[in-house]
Amino acid sequence: MLEAIHLHKRYHQGDIDVVAVDHFSFRFPPGLTAVVGPSGSGKTTLLNLLAGFDVPTEGEVRLDGTVLSRLSEDARSEVRLKHMGFVFQQWNLVPTLTAWENVAFPMMLAGIGQRERQARAAALLESVGLEKRAHHLPNKLSGGEQQRVAIARSLALNPPILFADEPTGNLDSVAGAKVVELLTAQAREGRTVILVTHDLELARKAERVLYLRDGRLIQVEETRPNPEIPGRAS
Ligand SMILES: Nc1ncnc2c1ncn2[C@@H]1O[C@H](COP(=O)(O)OP(=O)(O)OP(=O)(O)O)[C@@H](O)[C@H]1O
Ligand SMILES: [Mg+2]
């Protein structure tokens, strides 16, 4: 279970203090949670804190009871590798590696042998409908295809938590809907998926929508109960 407790992040910009995340508390249940809010409302900062890329000024992030900010940077990297997958708006894939190699890359970092890498990468590419594109370089793929490869890669080590920051930002509505469909499918398998998006229509496909303004959580909308997902009550 991923939990934010009174999470607060202040940046100093010259003489000015910017509060990017303002005492944000929420327990993220398994399933798809969307985070929406205007530009500058703190969505990316929140994701960076939840993933332990950044440490809060006050408050804490707990993952299964472990306080991330009390871990060393190396230990946090380890937690990320084992527990978290990431899909970003752009620059997702290593441009010099094929789709297949991109998906296998995290498995190599984790010391998984070649045969298993091969089998798992192939299965993951098939699960996002790209088995025929396995040997393409990213620049030979459409934006939507690249994002599907990024999703396949984010699942390489079977993480319980998936973060996606504007993964549909560069896509048309059809490709964007497909990406959200894949994220929804992951949520249905019991993963905790956190999706940042500007697109309220896409956000409403999540089970709950968190509204951020000026770093504050101003509203939690439960869009539709999903009895298929166990343990979603928070
Ligand atoms: N490293 C930093 N140093 C100083 N201020 C920062 C830093 N990172 C973010 N901020 C500020 O924190 C606030 C929140 O930024 P953040 O990137 O989290 O917003 P966002 O909701 O992701 O916006 P967008 O929708 O445009 O991506 C902004 O006012 C931003 O200027
Ligand atoms: Mg952002």
Image (cartoon, rainbow, N blue to C red):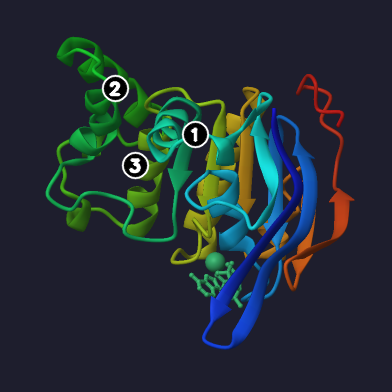
Nearer mark to the viewer, of 3 and 1: 1
Residue 165 x %, y %: 53, 56
CA distance separating discs 1 and 2: 13 Å
Question: Label 1 neighbourhood size at 10 Å, few (<14), some (14-19), many (20+)?
Answer: many
Q: Is residue 129 left or right of residue 39?
A: left
Is residue 78 left or right of 174 when viewed as pictured?
left
Mark 2 to mark 3: distance in Å? 19 Å
Q: Amino acid at mark 2?
A: Ala
Which residue in the structure is indicated by mark 1?
84
* Tag in front: 2 or 3: 2
* Three-letter amino acid code of the residue under disc 1: Met
Q: Earlier in the sequence, mark 3 or mark 1?
A: 1
- On the image, the x and y values in percent for residue 190 come to 65, 23
Instruction: Name which of mark 1 and mark 2 comes first in the sequence.
Output: 1
Badge 1 element: strand
Q: Nearer the viewer, residue 12 or 42?
A: 12
Q: Amino acid at mark 3?
A: Val
Q: How many marks?
A: 3
Q: Quadrant of ligand 1?
A: bottom right
How crowded is the residue under tag 2: few (<14 C-alpha within 10 Å), some, or many (20+)? few
Front position in the image: 214 or 36:
214
**In this rendering, would 77 be left or right of 190?**
left
Q: Quadrant of the C terminus?
A: top right
Q: Secondary structure at mark 3?
A: helix
The residue under label 2 is 110
Name the residue nearer the viewer: 36 or 44. Answer: 44
The percent position of residue 219, horizontal first and vertical second, equals 87, 59
Which residue does the numbered mark 3 point to in the structure image? 149
Secondary structure at badge 2 equals loop
Image vertical order of residue 24 relative to residue 60, above or below: below
